[in-house]
Amino acid sequence: MRIGIYGTGGAGGHFGARLAEAGEDVVFIARGAHLEAIRAEGLRVEMDDRVIRIHPANATDDPAKAGPVDVVLLGVKTWQVEDTARVMAPMLGRETFVVPLQNGVEAAGQLSDVLGVERVLGGLCATFSYVVGPGQIRSLGQVHSVRFGELDRRQSERTQRLRDAFTRAGVRANISDDIHIALWEKFLFVVPSGGVGAVTRAPVGVTRTVPETRRMVERGMEEIQSVGRARGVDLPDDAVTRALGFLDALDTAGTMSLQRDIAEGKPSELEAWNGAVVRLGKEAGVPTPVHSFLYSALLPLERRARGELVFPG
């Protein structure tokens, strides 16, 4: 397959490198110093057990130079999804489809509004991967996997082709029978953990063992379960129990992307994470006190990172 990685950050870079290493025709969309380093020295992904180096790497910041692809794996931040959808037209052939990998439950709908629902799958990934320097990505643990599916829950040949490409690359890939449930299950897992981690500035190995923070994470998961069900998503009864099990299995030093961005003073996905829980909860008439606290506590830092607020001193 010819695969476009639009947004070569932690997730996009990790999975794009795995696919390129396996022989797929991959073009990376990146920018700035990261792009220049990839062009000059290749894309380097440091995993626990080995290092992947894609050199030379086909990388550009111009969708027109990338040209048409079979599938676009979208790795940009949540607030960039709609704008990216509007500029990726040169990469879209007649049969091209787009798979968003963002944490959240709204990206597929945003893409569908711009590109048309027929071009969009629902998608998600699991990985502890982040950019450590220009052209360099660090991936922790062995949790790297992807899941995707048609928004109307049908089986399709294109999802099978994409799964086969990931399988050839040694990546665990599953076609979901109901991608909406899968998206909300991931949302339920990552959003409370990220919010509590950002407020406490502690890795998951700490927040999951301190009783008070563990209970806050658990209550946050319960709130998302209630909001999802109120919005018609058939989340299973054991969703919270299983999510806590996933949390307990993570590397003790692991942190969520939202937590890392806030700690580094960067714009984060707060609005699409804890903010979305609060907003969607209000729309559904479901109280969300834990997420309301996390969102309110982190909002000043978010606004400072976006240049909307200046701290005195």
Image (cartoon, grey):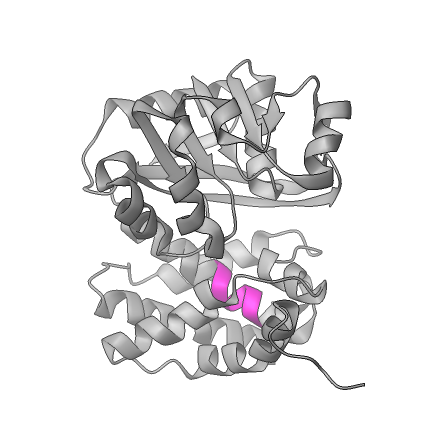
Across and down, in percent, residue 104 comes to 42, 56
Q: Residue at x 48, y 52 (%)?
A: 80
Q: Residue 243: which quarter of the image?
A: bottom left
The one of 282 and 153 positioned closer to us in this rendering: 282
| Residue 191 sits inside the magenta stretch | yes
Q: Quadrant of the N terminus?
A: top left
User: Which quarter of the rendering shows the C terminus?
Assistant: bottom right
Quarter holding residue 303: bottom right
State whether the magenta stretch is mostly helix, strand or loop. Answer: helix
Q: Residue at x 67, y 60 (%)?
A: 260
Residue 297 left/right relative to 78: right
Q: Nearer the viewer, residue 231 or 57?
A: 57
**Name of the residue lying farthest toward the top:** 23
Residue 18 shows in this picture: yes
The one of 26 and 203 positioned closer to us in this rendering: 26
Residue 44 in sight from this viewpoint: no
Q: Is residue 246 left or right of residue 173?
A: right
Magenta part of the chain: 190-195
Q: Determine if the magenta segment contains residue 285.
A: no
User: Residue 136 in the image: x percent, y percent?
Assistant: 73, 36
Q: Residue at x 38, y 80 (%)?
A: 288
Of 21 and 219, nearer the camera is 21
166 relative position to 177: left or right: right
Q: Position of residue 201 (x, y in %)?
A: 70, 70
x%, y% of residue 151?
24, 43
